[in-house]
Amino acid sequence: MIKNIGIGTGRRKNAVARVFVREGNGKMLVNDKEVAAYFATPEQVQIVRRPLMVTASDTKYDIVITVYGGGLNGQAGACSHGISRALAQVDVTNHTSLKANGLLTRDSRMVERKKYGQRGARRRFQFSKR
């Protein structure tokens, strides 16, 4: 049986990621795919791997992530947040370095809703004087 040593939930925009940290050698799966195969750009992969680089634990643990909702950028941010929370749970000494790099803070920016009588959230229809 596989034992999870840390569990974290990450959120960003409308994406939610459940992260399971296990003893291993640095393998990372996102929705049963390799992290580089799941995310489209190297920047997104870098965002996901950032908490591991900060704590210098990129080859210590295997990480399994299930993520849903939002787009790929939001999902990358959610994965990063979840990994950070799980690593802080695994080893308390990780908390200070993760906090200093702003990885434990949930990014609360969301898309503003569209209002009626307008073209978008803030954009209005063109005004005509005559």
Image (tube, helix red, strand yellow):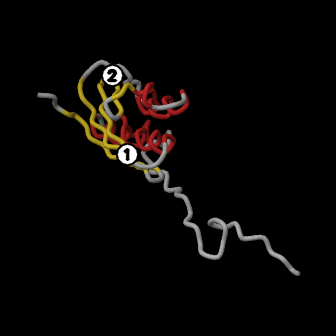
Q: Residue furthest left?
A: 1
Label 1 sits on residue = 68
Pinpoint residue 118: horizontal percent, then vertical percent.
Answer: 66, 72
Classify mark 1: helix, strand or loop: strand
Residue 37 or 104: which is nearer the viewer?
A: 37
Which of 5/93 is in front?
Answer: 5
Residue at x-position 49% and y-position 45%: 71
The picture places residue 2, in percent across and down from the top left corner, at: 16, 28
Residue at figure coordinates x 62%, y 66% from the top left: 121
How many residues crowd mark 2 within 10 Å: few (<14), some (14–19), many (20+)?
some
State the residue lying farthest toward the right. 130
Residue 58: percent from left, percent from top: 38, 23
Mark 1–mark 2 Cα distance, whole angstroms, equals 20 Å
Which label sits on residue 27? Answer: 2
Q: Amino acid at mark 1?
A: Tyr
Kind of residue indicated by mark 2: Lys
Q: Earlier in the sequence, mark 1 or mark 2?
A: 2
Of 47 and 37, the residue lying toward us: 37
- Characterize the local packing of mark 1: few (<14), some (14-19) or many (20 or more) Cα atoms within 10 angstroms: some
- Return the x and y of residue 115 as percentages of the image width and height: 59, 72
Please identify the residue farthest to the front as the structure is shown: 130
